[in-house]
């Protein structure tokens, strides 16, 4: 679990005080990884509590994090600080928060970040790291993973050292998000809830978080407008949805969306929506409600993205998706291989 969290509009301004407690000397460096959507927002940049030897590195979030990007960020940081920094602070969406988690791990662990994609492979504790979401839905602020695309696979670094030491939840930071991205990333949270609550791994712990998150999502997405209350609620939903899957697992939409992302670079939020739209068979009520929400917010889900793929490309996506055993086991049970065949996945991908 994330041990420390503050929540509230304007709570970003507590960051200086929070970091001060962690600096062993006023001169020790901390690194702020910040979504570059804020790079031209002088008012916001001035609010980042950068001290003497700290660095701000702006990150372009057009593409999802890659292991080579994490490795090269480590080089950049070491070339600037010449010592292991005392803290890594990620300010942005799932992309920047995942990068911050991975970079914090790679400050103290040898080799490439690709070596740690998997479960409990990290050897040494990460440096102190803080997550500050600026868009709500992924639950990356609370999860035990950092999802990376590597040379061979798209897989998280899942470890006890991955979660943030501190999270700052300030819903005010989400106000500039455009409606489409708000919907796609918010739906990630909705889909986490549906996959968790309908999964075989469900337990009282994940159920209590999942139900709360689902209620909040309904509250938010059944309203036509995005107001302050719904910004607050979606940030809370994201946290609870993330807690729910941390104690259970995601399911079919995520497994197949990973396939799209690996082959076509489809981003997580929209990829989940593209897949979920076709999963009536697995999640009938969730998909029906999802379609209503799509309509309400006048969102167009991309179609035909698999139209011109070769057999080989379909096979790659199917292999990536079927490689995620725990997700399928959660979705359909321990004997999932009897029900989920390559032919079945091919049929579903062809519809997308
Ligand atoms: P994102 O971080 O990719 O950002 C999406 C877009 O929104 C970007 O263009 C970004 O610049 C913009 N943006 C962010 N905040 C903004 C703001 N306040 N104003 C205006 N624009 C803003 O989006 P995401 O959906 O949050 O994250 C997706 C990533 O999260 C994927 O890489 C996915 O793999 C990862 N993820 C991780 C976990 C986990 O548990 N670690 C869970 C789910 C998803
Ligand atoms: Zn997700």
Image: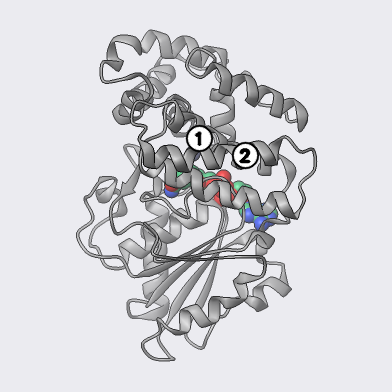
Quadrant that contains the N terminus: bottom left
Q: Does the residue labelled 2 lie within 8 Å of ligand 2?
A: no
Q: What is the quadrant of residue 254 in the picture?
A: top left
Q: Which of 237 and 59 is in front in this view?
A: 237
The x and y percentages for residue 307 are 58, 15
The x and y percentages for residue 10 are 66, 70
User: Is residue 63 in sight in this rendering?
Assistant: no
Q: Nearer the viewer, residue 204 or 311?
A: 204
Quadrant that contains the C terminus: top right
Q: Is residue 50 above or below residue 3?
A: below
Q: Is residue 269 above or below residue 86?
A: above
> What distance separates the C-alpha of mark 2 from that of mark 1?
9 Å
Outermost residue to the bottom: 26
The x and y percentages for residue 115 are 25, 49
Picture residue at 73% right of the left edge, 30% below the top: 299
Q: Which of 163 and 286 is in front in this view?
A: 286
User: Is residue 44 in sight in this rendering?
Assistant: yes
Picture residue at 62% right of the left edge, 52% below the top: 135
Left or right side of 242 for 122: left
**Label 2 packing within 10 angstroms: few (<14), some (14-19), many (20+):** many
Mark 2 and mark 1 in contact? Answer it, CB < 8 Å.
yes
Residue to which mark 1 is pinned: 193
Q: What is the quadrant of residue 46 in the picture?
A: bottom right
Residue 43: mark: none
Q: Is mark 2 on a helix, strand or loop?
A: helix
Residue to which mark 2 is pinned: 217
Q: Is mark 1 within 8 Å of ligand 2?
A: no
Q: What is the quadrant of residue 252 in the picture?
A: top left
Q: Earlier in the sequence, mark 2 or mark 1?
A: 1
Q: What element carries label 1?
A: helix
Left or right side of 27 for 84: left
Q: How many labels sit on residues?
A: 2
């Amino acid at each position: 679990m994330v041990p420390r969290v503050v929540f509230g509009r304007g709570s970003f301004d507590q960051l200086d005080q929070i970091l001060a407690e962690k600096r062993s000397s006023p001169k020790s460096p901390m690194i702020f990884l910040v979504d570059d959507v804020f790079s031209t927002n002088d008012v916001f940049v001035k609010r980042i509590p950068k001290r003497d030897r700290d660095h701000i590195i702006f990150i372009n979030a057009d593409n999802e994090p890659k292991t080579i990007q994490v490795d090269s960020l480590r080089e950049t940081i070491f070339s600037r600080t010449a010592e292991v920094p005392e803290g890594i602070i990620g300010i942005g969406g799932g992309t920047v928060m995942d990068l911050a988690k991975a970079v914090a791990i790679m400050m103290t662990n040898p080799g490439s970040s690709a070596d740690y994609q998997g479960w409990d492979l990290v050897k040494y504790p990460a440096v102190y790291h803080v997550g500050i979401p600026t868009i709500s839905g992924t639950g990356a602020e609370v999860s035990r993973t950092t999802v990376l695309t590597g040379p061979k696979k798209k897989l998280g670094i899942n470890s006890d050292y991955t979660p943030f030491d501190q999270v700052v939840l300030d819903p005010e930071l989400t106000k500039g998000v455009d409606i489409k991205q708000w919907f796609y990333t918010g739906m990630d949270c909705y889909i986490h809830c549906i996959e968790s609550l309908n999964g075989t791994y469900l337990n009282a712990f994940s159920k209590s978080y999942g139900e709360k998150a689902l209620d909040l999502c309904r509250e938010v997405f059944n309203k036509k407008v995005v107001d302050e209350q719904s910004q607050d609620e979606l940030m809370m939903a994201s946290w609870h949805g993330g807690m729910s899957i941390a104690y259970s697992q995601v399911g079919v939409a995520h497994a197949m969306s990973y396939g799209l992302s690996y082959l076509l670079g489809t981003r997580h939020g929209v990829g989940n929506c593209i897949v979920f739209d076709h999963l009536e068979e697995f999640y009938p009520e969730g998909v029906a409600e999802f379609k209503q929400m799509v309509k309400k917010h006048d969102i167009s889900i991309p179609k035909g993205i698999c139209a011109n793929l070769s057999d080989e490309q379909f096979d790659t996506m199917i292999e990536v998706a079927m490689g995620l055993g725990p997700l399928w086991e959660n979705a359909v049970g321990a004997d999932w291989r009897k029900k989920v065949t390559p032919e079945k996945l091919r049929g579903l991908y062809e519809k997308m």
